[in-house]
């Protein structure tokens, strides 16, 4: 459901084959960095929330580092995070090596599109009145089942990465950077703030290669990661469709995304990429 955008025009020289090879290498580099970024966000962001609970403090003292008095005071004052109850950890080796291919990277194809789409099936979820009180937050009340509308920030970060991925592969998605520049800047700033707030302290090392003068980075890093499947299953039990014509209804203006002649009406000012379709997303 993302709006169309286009990137900067690709440089064309006298050696088209070399240029295509260089361009492909550049795209793999960007996609690899994006992949490493999303894993870091999911690990640190959810882990930080988990450590805010008493159980999290115990885990942190044993497996991470001893919290200073100032950090303990900050954590004690943090709003409640309902998803903490779903958090589980497991050991993972990150591999952001250049040229690495996974089901989330490389040229757009059926595997990548379905893999990214599945990440957003449970983007929109319900929160109870008690949870809103504990978080000291307010939100619109949902019809058709009740509760209050919210999203886990982890899904929004993923949405931003998916949008930037579409910009990288602009020629395959037929998107225009001119129309999406404002939204892209929002996503870049959103990810920057999250990464700097929850700084990943793992270490990337460098080695010498026999035929390369400059040091070469080793992006393989061991991490203790949040079990994404467990977190996503927690969200699944609370998820709802924003297009079901029953749940999102403005008190005065009516259905947020009305269906007309079998099609959902999404106006340009609605910023379509913010409202991922069920199972498609970001």
Image (cartoon, rainbow, N blue to C red):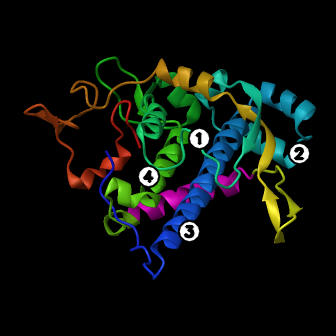
Assign a secondary structure to mark 1: loop
Query: Of discs 2 and 4, which sits in the foreground?
Result: 4
Q: Earlier in the sequence, mark 1 or mark 3?
A: 3
Query: Of discs 1 and 4, which sits in the foreground?
Result: 1
The answer to whether one can see residue 124 in this image is: yes
From the top left corner, tell me how far across and down residue 57 is, in percent: 83, 31
Q: Which label is found at residue 163? A: 4
As drawn, the residue found furthest toward the bottom would be 14
- In this rendering, is residue 136 above or below 107? above
Circle 1 residue: 102
From the top left corner, tell me how far across and down residue 144 is, in percent: 29, 19
Q: Quadrant of residue 61?
A: top right
Label 4: how many Cα within 10 Å (few below 14, some 14–19, many 20+)? many
Q: Main secondary structure of the magenta part?
A: helix
From the top left corner, tell me how far across and down residue 152 is, in percent: 53, 36
* Mark pair 1, 4: CA separation: 18 Å
The answer to whether one can see residue 52 in this image is: no
Magenta highlight range: 182-199
- Residue at the spot 48% in from the left edge and 17% down from the top edge: 237
Circle 2 residue: 69
Quadrant of the drawing holding the N terminus: top left
In terms of depth relative to the viewer, which is nearer, 207 or 260? 207
Query: Of discs 2 and 3, which sits in the foreground?
Result: 3
Q: Which label is found at residue 187? A: none
Label 1: how many Cα within 10 Å (few below 14, some 14–19, many 20+)? few
Circle 3 residue: 22
Quadrant of the drawing holding the C terminus: top left
Label 3: how many Cα within 10 Å (few below 14, some 14–19, many 20+)? few
């Amino acid at each position: 459901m993302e709006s169309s955008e286009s990137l900067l025009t690709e440089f064309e020289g006298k050696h088209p084959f070399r240029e295509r090879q260089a361009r492909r290498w550049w795209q793999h580099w960007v996609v690899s960095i994006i992949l490493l970024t999303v894993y870091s966000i999911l690990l640190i962001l959810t882990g930080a929330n988990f450590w805010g609970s008493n159980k999290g403090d115990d885990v942190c003292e044993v497996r991470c580092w001893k919290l200073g008095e100032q950090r303990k005071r900050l954590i004690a004052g943090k709003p409640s995070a309902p998803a903490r109850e779903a958090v589980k950890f497991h050991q993972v080796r990150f591999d952001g090596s250049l040229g690495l291919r996974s089901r989330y990277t490389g040229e757009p194809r059926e595997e990548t599109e379905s893999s990214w789409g599945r990440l957003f099936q449970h983007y929109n979820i319900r929160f109870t009145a008690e949870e809103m009180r504990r978080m000291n937050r307010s939100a619109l009340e949902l019809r058709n089942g009740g509760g209050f509308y919210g999203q886990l920030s982890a899904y929004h970060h993923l949405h931003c990465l998916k949008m930037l991925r579409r910009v990288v592969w602009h020629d395959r998605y037929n998107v225009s950077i001119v129309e999406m520049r404002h939204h892209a800047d929002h996503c870049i700033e959103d990810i920057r703030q999250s990464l700097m707030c929850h700084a990943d302290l793992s270490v990337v090392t460098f080695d010498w290669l026999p035929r390369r003068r400059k040091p070469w980075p080793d992006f393989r890093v061991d991490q203790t990661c949040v079990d994404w499947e467990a977190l996503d299953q927690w969200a699944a039990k609370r998820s709802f469709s924003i297009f079901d014509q029953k749940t999102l209804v403005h008190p005065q203006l009516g259905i947020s995304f009305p269906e007309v002649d079998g099609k959902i009406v999404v106006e340009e000012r609605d910023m379509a990429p913010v409202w991922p379709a069920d199972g498609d997303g970001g």
